[in-house]
Amino acid sequence: MKSQGILISALVFALLIAIFAVINVDSVEVNFLFTKTTLPLILVILASTLLGGLTVGLLGMIRQIRLKRTVKALEKQLSELTVEAERLGLTKAMLRTEPTEAEAVPKTE
């Protein structure tokens, strides 16, 4: 359901950009680092949108790769600690961090 919402939002955004670009068809002067050129504004808008989308997509992919590496490292650490705990003879109940009812401090009124 979440991916459908993202897809619909992206399509609406693309439609708005396309309408905005079609309305602005005048020629404009574009200054690059070493040269100047005249281009239709529609091309400038569409190229800027495309480059922005590619940049955001690339940064998102880099973030996902980093998160996957972190998850793998933490899963490896968890399995190593589980093996070590089993070697020491600890049970899963002993590894819990929450106190049991017997260990809980009684509330005073």
Image: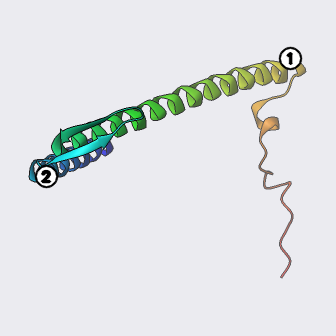
Q: Is residue 52 left or right of residue 60?
A: left
Q: Is residue 43 left or right of residue 100?
A: left
Q: Which mark is residue 28?
A: none
Residue identifier under label 1: 87
Residue identifier under label 2: 24
Q: Residue visible at 80% across and 29% down?
A: 91
Which quadrant of the view contains residue 104? bottom right
Asked whether 51 or 13 is in front, the reply is 51
Q: Nearer the viewer, mark 1 or mark 2?
A: 2
Amino acid type of the residue tagged 1 in the rendering? Arg
Q: Residue visible at 85% across and 27% down?
A: 90
Q: Residue visible at 68% across and 23% down?
A: 73
Q: Residue visible at 53% across and 25% down?
A: 65
In the rendered image, the vertical position of residue 13 relative to residue 57, given as above or below: below
Q: CA distance from mark 1 to mark 2?
A: 71 Å
Asked whether 81 or 4 is in front, the reply is 4
In the rendered image, the vertical position of residue 73 relative to residue 100, given as above or below: above
